[in-house]
Image (spheres, rainbow, N blue to C red):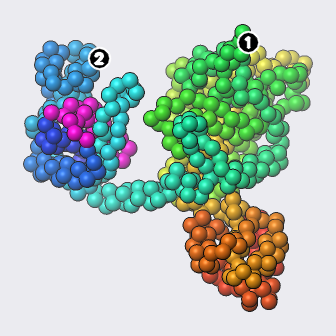
């Protein structure tokens, strides 16, 4: 049986064939296989709506049932130009192909410029295991200067069962979309006038951020990190010395002119932290030195790829830089990985995918240094008995790295933690420390972010918990709801008793059931209803999120319970 990628790509051709039959005069872009499916880009004479998809799908099934075979052919440039004379996008692609590399695939009445591979016949495609999922606009070759094409996406698998479980997860994922939940729960917003990819944190979202920041502050301080604060811009010369201007410029914004000098919005915090290291002569006794900062950085992202909080143009990294002697590298890396996993676990993430990325073609430092650092990273993962995969050549130019992707409750992986060894910056900035024998040596530098960025991590948290954040993270933990106006005073007393928590007394003149409903929509962990009985006995009626009414309990007892829960970070 054909590989799933081959089936997916063949389905893209069948999709194009169906569109050619249904909408004559269509111009064709490209149609690759992608993760979980395929797409094809079309320049159509009319616009399509999701309601058009079943018809196209039906046509595709009809074509598949005809057992169409895929035939490969080789063409000269002039023949292919003739063949695709009415297809401007194909002609553009042909222009860039070398003379002897032009191949086409013919399936029924549809011919496409394509390298393949493809299935031999549509017999190999399960007509029940694919579905057209959505229509989106996409610029030809991803550039805003080019025409906007219509992209039709499809999901495809080998079996119907795989397809339906994928579609189910998709449906669940849509319900958890942090962009929608974030608005509903009033955590963050975007505003066109402010600019794309620049989130505004609303009061409740800011509380959530602060809780996470405070937790990190405590955790990292215990681990011996020192905190630093650095500016959002820095002189362009700094970024030239660091190599960012040369190697990272496509992610940076245009310089800002101040007086006669040029400045850059920082895409990373590293050079600043490094300058603090260099503020005095360091000895081996000062090492290992760890500087941490919740540093807000700015990186250019194309507007087309911006996505809620998970892809933004300004974000705050939980960043840190560690300098140690080469002898201490393995030990420091071990601590780092262990500590990182502990923190992720506290947030409820227990499943990971771990990648070790090795030397790319273009690299800074020496081959020997790379080998040593890569071995250290490997050693650490093996010592901690962590399963990992090697990403050959996937390291950044300055050093090898470990990436940890967390898996959310739907099993989707999200890139979070990154731990990178760096040979480049210590060299470029001539960093040094004095060793035991009084000799000048170069320290090893490690960059590391555990959560990645607060924005992205909070987006993942929201999707993982479908907005129902654990008690210790919930911006509003408890609502006290008086039954009638004569219970308002008691509700305020309860609020006061619980004042070490984030608690609101809801004394608006609305019915109890309406307030409960509102509390459920806002995903408040505990709703405490208070009426005559509760008032008399110094109690509360507890409605626990996800469990409903759990009965009356003494206020002191409730307080005990939630104290334990928050302490355990549940
Ligand atoms: Zn193809
Ligand atoms: Zn860094």
Q: Quadrant of the rendered structure where residue 417 is?
A: top right
Query: Is residue 74 positioned above or below 212 on the image?
Result: above
Q: State which tag comes first along the sequence, 2 or 1.
A: 2
Q: Nearest the camera: 444 or 33?
A: 33
Q: Is residue 189 left or right of residue 225?
A: left
Q: What element carries label 2?
A: helix
Q: Residue at x 27, y 22 (%)?
A: 93
Residue 120 visible: no
Q: Mark 1 points at which residue?
A: 259
Query: Is residue 58 positioned above or below 250 on the image?
Result: below
Q: Name the residue under label 2.
A: 96
Query: Is residue 93 positioned above or below 415 on the image?
Result: above
Query: Is residue 503 positioned above or below 40 on the image?
Result: below
Q: Quadrant of the rendered structure where residue 18 is?
A: top left
Tell me, yes or no, whether the highlighted magenta stretch contains residue 208.
no
The CA span between labels 2 and 1 is: 45 Å
Relative image position of residue 530 (x, y in whole percent)? 72, 82
Q: Is mark 1 on a helix, strand or loop?
A: loop
Q: For the magenta stretch, what is the residue range?
A: 25-47
Q: Quadrant of the rendered structure where residue 431 is?
A: top right
């Amino acid at each position: 049986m054909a590989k799933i990628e081959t089936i997916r790509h063949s389905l893209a051709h069948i999709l194009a064939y169906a569109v050619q039959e249904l909408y004559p005069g269509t111009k064709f872009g490209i149609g690759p296989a992608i993760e979980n499916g395929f797409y094809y880009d079309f320049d159509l004479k009319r616009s399509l709506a999701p309601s058009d998809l079943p018809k196209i799908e039906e046509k595709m099934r009809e074509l598949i049932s005809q057992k169409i075979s895929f035939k490969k052919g080789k063409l000269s440039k002039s023949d292919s130009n003739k063949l695709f004379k009415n297809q401007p996008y194909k002609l553009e692609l042909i222009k860039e192909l070398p003379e002897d590399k032009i191949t086409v695939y013919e399936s029924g009445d549809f011919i496409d410029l394509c390298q393949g591979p493809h299935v031999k016949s549509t017999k190999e495609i399960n007509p029940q295991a694919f579905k057209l999922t959505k229509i989106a606009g996409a610029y030809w070759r991803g550039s805003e200067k080019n025409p906007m094409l219509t992209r039709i996406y499809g999901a495809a698998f080998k079996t119907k069962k795989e397809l339906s479980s994928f579609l189910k997860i998709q449906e669940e994922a849509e319900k958890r979309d942090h962009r929608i939940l974030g608005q509903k729960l009033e955590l963050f917003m975007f505003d066109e006038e402010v600019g794309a990819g620049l989130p505004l944190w609303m009061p409740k979202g800011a509380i959530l951020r602060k809780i996470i920041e405070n937790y990190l502050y405590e955790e990292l301080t215990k681990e011996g990190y020192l905190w630093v604060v650095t500016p959002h811009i820095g002189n362009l010369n700094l970024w030239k010395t660091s190599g960012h201007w040369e190697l990272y410029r496509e992610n940076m914004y245009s310089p800002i002119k101040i007086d006669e000098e040029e400045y850059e919005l920082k895409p990373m915090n590293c050079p600043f932290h490094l300058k603090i290291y260099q503020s005095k002569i360091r000895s081996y006794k000062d090492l290992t030195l760890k500087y941490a900062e919740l540093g807000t950085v700015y990186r250019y992202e194309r507007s087309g790829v911006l996505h809620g909080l998970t892809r933004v143009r300004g974000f705050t990294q939980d960043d840190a830089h560690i300098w140690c002697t080469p002898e201490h590298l393995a030990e420091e890396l071990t601590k780092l990985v262990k500590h990182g996993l502990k923190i992720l676990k506290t947030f409820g993430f227990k499943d990971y995918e771990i990648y070790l990325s090795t030397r790319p073609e273009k690299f800074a430092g020496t081959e020997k240094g790379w080998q040593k650092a890569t071995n250290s990273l490997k050693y650490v993962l093996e010592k901690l008995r962590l399963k990992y995969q090697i990403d050959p050549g996937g390291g950044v130019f300055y050093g090898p790295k470990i990436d940890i992707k967390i898996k959310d409750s739907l099993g989707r992986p999200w890139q979070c933690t990154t731990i990178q060894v760096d040979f480049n910056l210590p060299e470029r900035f001539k960093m040094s420390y004095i060793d035991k024998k009084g000799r000048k040596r170069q320290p090893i530098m490690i960059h590391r972010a555990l959560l990645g960025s607060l924005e992205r991590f909070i987006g993942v948290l929201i999707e993982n918990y479908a907005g129902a954040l654990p008690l210790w993270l919930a911006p509003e933990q408890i609502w006290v709801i008086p039954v009638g106006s004569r219970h308002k005073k008691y509700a305020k007393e309860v609020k006061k008793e619980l004042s070490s928590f984030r608690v609101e007394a809801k004394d608006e003149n609305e019915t109890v059931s309406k307030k409960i409903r509102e509390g459920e929509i806002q995903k408040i962990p505990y709703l405490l209803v208070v009426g005559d009985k509760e008032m008399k006995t110094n109690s509360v009626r507890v409605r626990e999120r996800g469990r409903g009414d759990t009965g009356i309990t003494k206020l002191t007892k409730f307080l005990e319970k939630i104290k334990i829960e928050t302490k355990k970070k549940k």
